Amino acid sequence: MLHTALRNRSNTPLLVKGEDVTQQVNAELNKMEIFVEKVRNGQYCGYSGKSITDVVNIGVGGSNLGPQMVTEALKHISRDKIKSHYISNVDGTQIAEVLRPLDPERVLFIVSSKSFSTIETMTNAKTARQWMSSAAFDDKSIDNQFVAVTAKPEKAMADGFSENRIFKIWDWVGGRFSLWSAIGLPIALDLGFDKFIELLEGAHEMDQHFKTAPLEQNAPVIMALVALWNTTFLGCQSQAILPYDQTLHMLSAYLQQAEMESNGKSVSWNGEAIDYPTVASIWGGVGINGQHAFYQYLHQSKNIIPADFIGTVESATKVRGHHTPLMANFFAQTQALMTGVDEAQVRKDLKAKGRQADFINNLAPHKVHEGNRPTNTILLKKLDTWTLGSLIAMYEHKIFVQGILLQICSFDQWGVELGKGLAVKIQNELHHGELNTHHDSSTQHLIEYYQKYKQAKSS
Ligand code: G6Q
């Protein structure tokens, strides 16, 4: 995978099958820039001649999580010229809720799909089109309000997108590594093209670091080795991502896909079964909220959960009196997880508070924290476009190094195909009210129940 070519800001030529992809990337970036400027300047209008105020990205997985995580993280620098919205779920509730407050005269839809065949995305795109048609009364006039991002332009064209409304990505861009390409169009529309470039520059800087820094100072390499140690050697089965910065509230969801889809494998790149654990399951959430929810488990459960703590020296939004208590918790939690507190100390503290012996005997074992729970601390000066680009790129390279160490292919995702294929067949059955008998009895009965009650409801 060549996602680093998407942010190759030094413009060094990079040949793929004899073609310089840097030129292709730059050409597409130019096309994006012109489009973004037009939309943000109010020159690109909806069917009634009004400027665009809202952008709705329709896409799922890699065509959703990156742009959404980034626009959420950089809300504080968005001047709100354009508001971004995301539709990923085929559950109609999401599209209904997203579209409800929007004005069809001022919305731009981005249909974002590398394959341009993902059923969820195509279904949502069709519904968006119907919503627009019923408002505009003229199907042709709404064309401008739909653009596509895809590696299959011919499919988008067959769906009615003209060439100037198609932004290209390439087969060599993996979905979960694609936010640096035209998949990042919602980011550029939301923040402005110059900010999008800053994001790419931050990532490029990390690419250079990864390429040139000695191994013992190389952040992605160190992160990968620590992860390998914790998971493969110490047997830790999950890993928490705990940002102490509200801007990063979607980071764990983003990394969950990036790490788990890349390295959640059980055969080597030669196709041989492997007998060691690969990547831990990734989860997490904003640190402070976690403290009042699941940190109990981090501190005292029998399972050891390594965690990445990510904080900032300077707050993204200056609200007096908030950053100090936030960061005090940040430092306190990693200290507590590392040092813990033994029974002798617990007893001493209780005694100093004047507690009686019986009380101390009963309570002491419950207050013991074993400590020695591994954490990585990433302390950023400030969360801005550049640092965010660097941070994401660091995790991308960590994933790559981990894949190499584990001898697995980080860039495929066969595990998502089986269920997808079955869903197509079952959707057909549900559609026609039929039931094939090839299912296992559990699935068979569930579908029967669904069909029976659905029919009863509609009769
Ligand atoms: C990412 C995965 C996956 C993919 C989605 C959407 O690496 O392959 O999350 O991005 O399935 O695919 P399309 O972009 O083709 O619709």
Image (cartoon, rainbow, N blue to C red):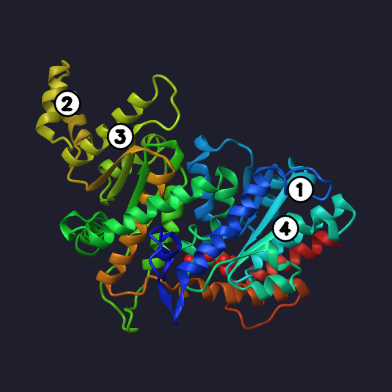
- Marks 4 and 3 sit apart, C-alpha to C-alpha, by 44 Å
First along the sequence among labels 4 and 2: 4
- Marks 1 and 3 sit apart, C-alpha to C-alpha, by 46 Å
Quadrant holding the C terminus: bottom right
Q: Is residue 114 visible?
A: yes
Mark 3 lies on a secondary structure that is helix
Residue 382 x %, y %: 36, 36
Could you classify mark 2 by the number of other residues whose Cα lies within 10 Å: few (under 14), some (14-19), or many (20 or more)?
A: some
Q: Residue furthest right?
A: 137
- Position above or below: 337 against 44: above
The residue wearing badge 2 is 360
Residue 46 appears left or right of 384: right
Mark 4: which amino acid?
Phe
Residue 157 lies in quadrant: bottom right
Could you classify mark 1 by the number of other residues whose Cα lies within 10 Å: few (under 14), some (14-19), or many (20 or more)?
A: some
Residue 316 x %, y %: 43, 33
Mark 3: which amino acid?
Phe
Q: Is mark 1 within 8 Å of ligand 1?
A: no
The reply to whether dot 1 and dot 4 touch (C-beta < 8 Å) is no
Nearer the viewer's eye, disc 1 or disc 4?
A: 1
First along the sequence among labels 3 and 2: 3
The residue wearing badge 4 is 146
The residue closer to the viewer here, 234 or 251, is: 251
Nearer the viewer's eye, disc 4 or disc 2?
A: 4
Mark 2: which amino acid?
Ile
Residue 276 appears left or right of 440: left
Could you classify mark 4 by the number of other residues whose Cα lies within 10 Å: few (under 14), some (14-19), or many (20 or more)?
A: many
The reply to whether dot 1 and dot 3 touch (C-beta < 8 Å) is no
The residue wearing badge 1 is 45
Residue at the location (52% across, 55% down)?
65
Mark 1: which amino acid?
Cys
First along the sequence among labels 4 and 3: 4
